[in-house]
Structures are given as C-alpha cells and as structure tokens.
Amino acid sequence: KMKFNYDKLLGRIVEVYGNQSNFAKDMKLSERSISLKLNNVRRWKDTEIKLAVQLLKIPESKVHLYFFNE
C-alpha cells in the first residue's frame, strides 16, 4: 500500500484553520476521520481532496505536493 507524506497538508490545515477540528467541521467529517486520512489509515476520496483544496486555497498546480507526496 502506498504511503503519502501529509506533513505539508497538516501544516496548511493549521495555518488556515488553527487545528484539525475546525477543518474537519468544514469538511463535514469527524476529527478522527481527518486524523486517519493524515496518518495513511484511510484514503482521501476525490471529492474530499477537491473540497480540501478549495477550503485551504491550494493552487491547482500544487495539489500533488499536498496529497500525492511520497
């Protein structure tokens, strides 16, 4: 199973939202669900990536750095 490094994504979440909990609310997911995704236990769905990119104002050209970085 492929493991991705979500350190950059977590940094952006904290930068924009202050913490995972606030981000989880806007994502309409539980804090636990976000945590499992950031720790490679659960996979990010395409629709979740799309929403996260909008909420975190990640430029389309940089999405791979946040979600597909090994």
Image (cartoon, rainbow, N blue to C red):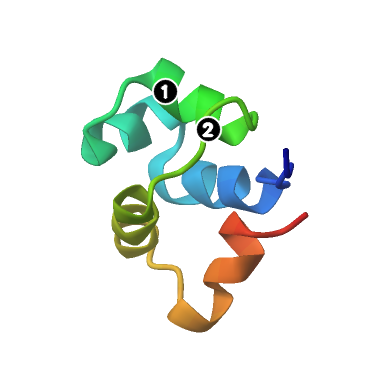
The secondary element bearing badge 2 is classed as helix
Reading the image, the residue beneath label 1 is 33
Q: Residue furthest right?
A: 70
Pointers 1 and 2 in contact (C-beta within 8 Å): yes
- Give the quarter of the figure containing the N terminus: top right
Give the vertical position of 69 relative to 37 (above or below).
below
Residue 69: x %, y % from top left: 71, 59
The amino acid marked with disc number 1 is: Ser
- Look at 70% across and 45% down and name the residue there: 7
Q: Residue furthest bottom?
A: 61
Residue 60 shows which numbered tag? none
Reading the image, the residue beneath label 2 is 37
Rounded to the nearest angstrom, the CA distance separating label 1 from label 2 is: 6 Å
The secondary element bearing badge 1 is classed as helix
Give the vertical position of 36 relative to 64 (above or below).
above
- Look at 33% across and 31% down and name the residue there: 24
Residue 68: x %, y % from top left: 64, 59
Q: Residues within 10 Å of mark 1 (few under 14, many from 20)?
A: some
70 or 18: nearer the viewer: 70
Q: Determine the image quadrant of residue 57.
A: bottom left
- Give the quarter of the figure containing the C terminus: bottom right
The amino acid marked with disc number 2 is: Lys
Residue 15: x %, y % from top left: 51, 49
